[in-house]
Image (cartoon, rainbow, N blue to C red):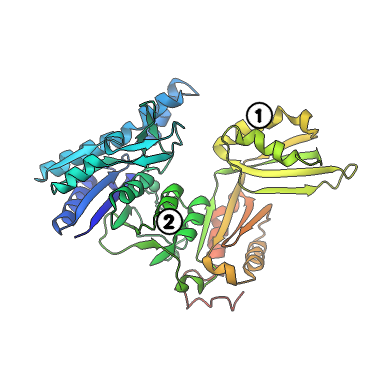
Amino acid sequence: MALIVQKYGGSSVATPELMKKVAKRAIAAKNEGNKVVVVLSAMKGETDKLLKLARSVTPEPNPRELDTLVSTGEQVSVALFAMTAQSLGETVKSFLGFQAGISTDDNHGKARILSADPARIATELAKGRLAVVAGFQGIDKHGDITTLGRGGSDTTAVALAVALGADVCEIHTDVDGIFTTDPNVCRDARKMEKISYEEMLELSSLGAKVMEIRSVELGMVHNLKIHVRNAHNPSPGTIICQEDESMEKTPVRGVTHSTDEARITLVNVRDRPGVAARILSVVSKAEIVVDMIIQNKSAEGDGNRTDFSFTVPSNDYDKAMELLGNVLNELEAEKILGDDNIAKISLVGAGMRNHAGVAAKMFRTLAAEGININMISTSEIKISCVIEKKYAELAVRVLHEAFRLDLPPGENGGTEDI
Ligand code: ADP
Ligand code: ASP
Ligand code: MG
């Protein structure tokens, strides 16, 4: 007997018919002798609809009230699931985030889970019952409803799995697992049998929305087995687990892209100690996360000038431009330039640690398509390039082909071809 947390995403519960299929799948897992907790997202499109509704009332909704509103998407899902499962003869109760003991900080819209105390869920399991929990939501120390950020139901599922000591957290979605790249962008994308937490963290942070990044972090810290699989297909999907030797055979395991970032450049900033810290403190005070950073001496001027560029999430772009625009004089900067017409393309692979030449091949491949690279950043297991947005999907496809990610590891030439 295993304890399984099954999370179903919005597309998997998009209609009453699909909800019934999902309920049957959870009941079947329970009837096989397992203890099963179900975590649900809002039905597909509902969260967007609620966000739009709020913005039809006011351009800047109050964050507390916005969370009260958008969390209802998941409330609808769990109540419908419980009714559906009951109609199939099952005894089941639905729980909202707070009823399942999900406590968060009070950062509305991006709240972090501080603790999970699913005592009521454990009681249901002990009675041999199914429990269904609303993902994406929690409660803060003031007793207010919070939400965890887009894709946050993944994090609810992993947090509950950790707290309940589950054997596995299954993330049921609309594709068969984690692929070498988004299968909806590249037809040759190949499903991976397993992927390391670190590789998945990089893929998530670089744009692969199939797993929300905090859920991967939490799984990694607690060494929880995560199984990403198709909600409507019984075949095994992809296991996210500790790295093993097989993962290092090929330098590149996945390609991903993100079009949700923008670049900001402060031109001809006075080059003196503390200037980079000052620029970044202005944005970080507004809780804006900076990603790539490049500083280089300006070719113009008296030699004491530098250009400072960095990327921010598109959502925070206007705000960051405004905040920095206000301190241009203090920074002695000539001007500020912004560009939200960019995409970030990344290669990820644990094997990059031991293999040289990946960057050169990436740049050659992009150049052959006439794609210009604007910014580059690297870590131990990834290389990212900023390019013009219109080339994003083309870049994914040509890189996938150049690194032969369509072939299984061991058959794709490994590093020889680099
Ligand atoms: P859910 O509603 O189940 O949470 P999401 O839409 O959040 O599903 O995530 C699933 C989607 O992630 C897929 O439909 C796919 O387009 C996208 N995706 C991006 N990169 C990958 C990848 N490397 N492997 C699998 N899916 C990916
Ligand atoms: N419903 C939320 C969203 O659309 C949370 C989730 O689906 O995980 O982002
Ligand atoms: Mg998701």
Q: Nearer the viewer, mark 2 or mark 1?
A: 2
N-term mark: 2 or 1:
2
Residue 93 shows in the view: yes
Whether residues under marks 2 and 1 lie with C-beta atoms below 8 angstroms apart, the answer is no
- Ligand 2, what quadrant? top left
Q: Residue at x 38, y 67 (%)?
A: 193
Q: Is residue 173 above or below residue 249?
A: above
Q: CA distance from mark 2 to mark 1?
A: 37 Å
Badge number at residue 220: 2
The kind of residue tagged 2 is: Met
| Secondary element at tag 1 | helix
> Residue at image x 18%, y 56%?
34
Q: Secondary structure at mark 2?
A: helix
Which residue is rendered at x = 64% and y = 70% of the image?
357
Res. 302 image quadrant: top right
Tell me if I can see residue 207 in this picture.
Answer: no
Q: Which mark is residue 322?
A: 1
Q: Residue at the left extreme?
A: 89
Whole-percent x, y for residue 394 in the image:
56, 58
Amino acid type assigned to the residue bearing label 1 in the image:
Glu
